[in-house]
Image (tube, rainbow, N blue to C red):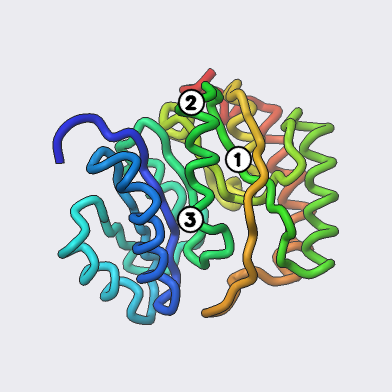
Amino acid sequence: MSGPLRASICSPIHNEEGNVAELIERVHAVMTPRFGAAWEQLLIDDGSSDRSAEIIRAAQRERPTLRLLQHPQNRGERAAWKTAFDNARGEVVALLAGDLQSPPEELPKLLDEVLVRGFDVGTGRRAGRKDGVYYWTATRVLNAYSRLVFDVPVSDVSSSFFAVRRRFVEALPIEKNDHRYILAVLRRRAARISEVDTEHAARSRGRSHYSRWKVLKAVPELLEFTQRWRSGVFDGQGS
């Protein structure tokens, strides 16, 4: 593959054998007509115990824009994001969950916020969110906190569906569950953030990796993150 890449579409994968083939096809159907060969898809297999990696390797034979990166053991979503950020080669890096709840067809909206409108980050606001009331309520609380404390100008801070100029995530010192607050991290790096409505679908295959226990643990975790955020840990490349 020669020449600069415009975009890297990155997805953490953990036991998504029921979704990964469709994910690959739908991402390529959206990206190839627009970018030709000047883009890449990075799938980070985070220690899957099912056929996810096997399916990806088979797809690579027909998809030269597809790259598989593997963790020998499950290290969690934060580690998968870090692997994506450290290996992406595109001008813009987009994060897309492997469960297909955020439709790949919405990627152009986020990419356009950066490549066309000139923002540093384009992030999705899940319209008609298909999660339960418990998670919806927790998200509303986090949204309010993020606007007040981190000055993040969005109404869906935890969608995890975004596109960002690569320089903002190069050598990014994220640890623990910092990825949950990625927009606050990018805002600390002086990123200009734009939010657009994106569709959201219910998970149709596989098991969710989220639980109510994770939400409850997020309270002390958020306070610890806030202290580190204020200390300037994340200042750097994009600023």
Marker disc for residue 123: 1
The quadrant of the picture occupied by the N terminus is: top left
Could you tell whether 139 is left or right of 90 in the image? Answer: right
Which of marks 3 and 2 precedes in the sequence? 3
Separation of residues labelled 2 and 3 (CA atoms): 19 Å
Could you tell whether 41 is left or right of 168 in the image? Answer: left
Q: What element carries label 1?
A: strand
* Residue picked out by circle 2: 116
Label 2 crowd bin: few (<14), some (14–19), many (20+), radius 10 Å:
few
Which of marks 3 and 1 precedes in the sequence? 3
Q: Of the residues tagged 1 and 3, which is closer to the observer?
A: 3
Residue 164 at x, y = what percent? 49, 34
Q: Quadrant of residue 131?
A: bottom right
Type of the residue with mark 3: Pro
Q: What residue sits 30% from the left and 42% below the top?
A: 39
* Position of 17 relative to 7 (above/below): below
Type of the residue with mark 1: Thr
* Residue picked out by circle 3: 104
